[in-house]
Amino acid sequence: MWEMLKVYNTLSRSKEEFQPLNENEVRMYVCGPTVYDYPHIGNARSFAAFDTIRRYLEFRGFHVFYVTNFTDIDDKMITRANEQGIEVQELAEKFIAEYLQIADELNLKPASVNPRATEHMDDIIDMVQSIMDRGVGYAANGDVYFDISEWENYGVLSKIDPDELAAGARVETGEKKEDPRDFVLWKEKKPGEPSWDSPWGKGRPGWHAECSVMGSYYLGVPFDIHGGGQDLIFPHHENEIAQSAAAYGVETPVKYWLHNGFLTINEDKMSKSEGNFFTAREVLDNYDNQGVRFFLVSGHYRQPLDYNNQALKQATQSVERIRNAVDAIRGRISILTKKKVQPTEADDNIAEAIELLKTEFEKEMDDDFNTPGAIAAVFSFIRTLNANLEETGKAAVLREALAVLSTRLEILGIDISRKELTGSSELRSIVEKSIELLLEIREKAREEKDYETGDMIRNRLTEMGVSITDTKDGPTWKIEA
């Protein structure tokens, strides 16, 4: 029986019952990377947070259409390409490939679609023209701006008063806006920049316009969830709401706005502009990938998460505890399928722990995707499992335990398959059966008091990285990292 799923909506500044616009279907857009540089580990936090949210919604039975974009044309892209003496498109291809590799190593599910801004120029031009037709946009010598003075709901997401915004606003060099608060929808071409034809002359879109168009193109308006970092609330998402509502004639283009907290270093926001960041590549090259994923989801997605070496080490140790528990379950199942052992009280204890894990994990995730609480439920289950495992007599109970644990870990993006047994499933099966055969030969040798052969098998397996534990019901094994 499902409890009510609640999500924190930045728009209302409150937790709300989650009710998608269409039953059993969730349309979700998450702001993706601007592909001018290697993503830093703070970007990866956002990637992992919304991947986990998506996974849980799918676990809850929703069909999720998940869109995350590539911003492949903007000021940063042009500046970096010019610095390197290459075309903007070449720069984009390089860092899109890097993002996809990072996504694979972090075990992110592939998006339903990864649109690129440059693929939607005609759609962007149409949206800008629609805004102008509605009287809330104006052209100024090749540029086009959104007229905030004509939009009374500006500030609905960020809670910023437009009148107060005017006090600190200023017109940058080269801008042609009538009001310093107005934001650009289309930029006139400058020498050496990529450009596209438009009714206002050659130019390129503003960043905010790109996301509005890609979201509406693939998801329609309104759609269910828009996600991104807290730093995108203003001005990016605020501007998205204004221009989408104006262009498409809706009160709000998105029902639920979700924002993840910053990744910090010594409680300072990690950012490229400040220079205090680590790239995701640096971190993944130095730590267990599953440990990195565990770290990124170990804090509640809306709260800050502080990056440090100790936290990464602890996360890696936590993943190893999980792997050890999984290996122990598999080993005990192997024993119980070979030997007849009577059911025991330990079986009942584990059966109760399975039901408790289901209830507690889902209760925590139903509360605005509370991953720390869900992780606590996982480790509570593992403690009960470890305390009872050697006394169990029912392989069926342990198979259920493994299945339930695996499903919950998959929601967190943790893959509990033995990382050392890479390759095809057929190859893994051959390796596992070979180890089991060697252990059977070892057991037979020990029964016949041929301890030399038994020790030789154990020593050779140990040399190959296979750890063996002898129990009263027979040996278990695992491959060490």
Image (cartoon, grey):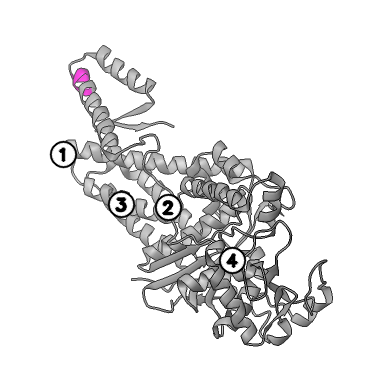
Dot 3 or dot 4: first in sequence order is 4
Q: Is residue 103 left or right of residue 326?
A: right
Spot occupied by residue 351 in the image (x, y as percentages of width and height): 29, 54
User: Which residue has dot 4 on it?
Assistant: 259
Which mark sits nearer the N-terminus, 1 or 3? 1
Inter-mark Cα distance, 2 to 1: 29 Å
Residue 446 colored magenta? yes
Secondary structure category for the residue under label 4: strand
Residue identifier under label 2 = 378
Confirm whether residue 456 shows in the render: yes
Is 271 on the left-hand or right-hand side of 251? right
Residue 336 image point, x, y percent: 21, 39
Give the structural element (helix, strand or loop) at label 1: loop
Q: Is residue 267 in sight in this rendering?
A: no
In percent of width and height, residue 165 lies at 78, 77
**Where on the picture, by quarter, is residue 389?**
top left
